Amino acid sequence: MIADRKDDHVRHAVDQRRADTGGNDFDCVTFVHHALAGIDSADVSLAIDFAGKPWDSPLFVNAMTGGSAKTGEINRKLAIAARETGVPIATGSMSAYFRDPAVADTYRVLRQENPHGVVLANVNANATVEQALRAIELLEADALQIHLNSVQEAVMPEGDRSFGSWPRQIEHLVAGVPIPVIVKEVGFGLSRQTVTWLRDAGVAVADVGGRGGTNFARIENSRRPAGDFAFIESWGQSTPNCLLDCAGIDGIDIAATGGIRSPLDIARALALGATATGVAGAFLDTVVRHDTDALIGQIRTWHDQLRQILTVLGARTPAELAGCDLLITGDVATFCALRGIDVASLAHRSPWWRESRDRGGVIGE
């Protein structure tokens, strides 16, 4: 039954992406173009420091699947693409492995095909320390993701209904595993209060996992005979809203996932304060509809395009995007007004004109 559910999730996720041709809240985030801010592309590096380790790219393949023969093959293709492009990769929830060790290879393939890459294990918030250590050992994982999915579980016909132990269990996992812990939402967002709590609990990374990408409430509702949870499909905060809500929280890295459709969305997320960005739906669609080579080409193209965006904006590193001028409009501006977030200041933070003046130019005088 678990294998069938994993296959259902992939099928519904791909169908959802093909049917969803609308925009999302990243369209409410616009860079102010300064025509003389550009730098030389050769001076741009995409490298970042994340969860205490160097990554070659701010892009990673985020948690998707595992637990069945079909999903194991998908993981194999994803792992090859990660290996060939040098991006980190996370496995999907490993709950199926804890219930049936026979499916171990559907997860282990991520390390087998990517022996020297960065691989993230993924468990739910009910996992014990012993289970987390088993997952880490199986993948020789570099970090542990704990996914928060109370909304998905509530809609899932066979889902959990008890979430009160999650904070205590997260503290146990942070204390009990030897690698950095990443806590991620699965598409409904993390609030400022939640991220602050995670920081204080010793979590290394908060992945905001906002609304705008794969909608697991919609997926689980599609699996309900009566489809009677459609009213909850718009639950949660979008990824841009989460990033703005969490701005300025020190002591924890922020990852942005949920609704990232292009290198421009990656740049927007980094400019809103994310250190790294994860993509699942867009890459899953490429692997399922095409093949591994197509995904390798897509990731390489995205890297090249992201580099050119940084070049035009005058950002030598992904971190420097956080100094670029942004215009926040539409629903995101409304959210920020209600949460007391000053977005007007984001439109006036670029240092490029001062740097030009210091080099002897007259712009900005």
Image (tube, grey):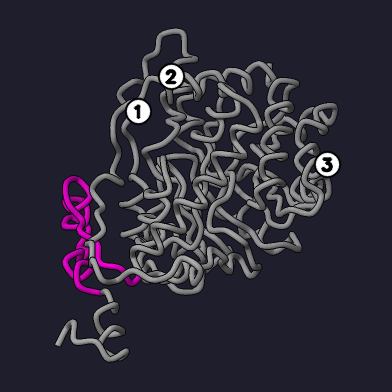
Percent coordinates x, y for residue 109 in the rendering: 79, 37
Disc 3, SS: helix
Q: Earlier in the sequence, mark 2 or mark 3?
A: 3
Nearest the eye: 210 or 40 = 40
Q: Which mark is residue 18?
A: none
Distance CA(mark 2)–CA(mark 3): 35 Å
| Classed neighbour count for the residue bearing mark 2: other residues with Cα under 10 Å, few (<14), some (14–19), many (≥20) | many
Q: Earlier in the sequence, mark 2 or mark 1?
A: 2
Confirm whether the magenta stretch covers residue 332: yes
Residue that mark 2 sits on? 221
Residue that mark 3 sits on? 112
Contact check, label 3 and label 1, Cβ < 8 Å? no
Confirm whether the magenta stretch covers residue 320: no
Q: In the figure, is residue 200 to the left or right of 136?
A: left
* Residue name at image x 49 percent, y 15 percent: 223
Q: Which residues are magenta?
A: 323-349
Mark 3 belongs to which amino acid? Gln
Residue that mark 1 sits on? 233
Q: Earlier in the sequence, mark 3 or mark 1?
A: 3
* Residue name at image x 79 percent, y 44 percent: 111
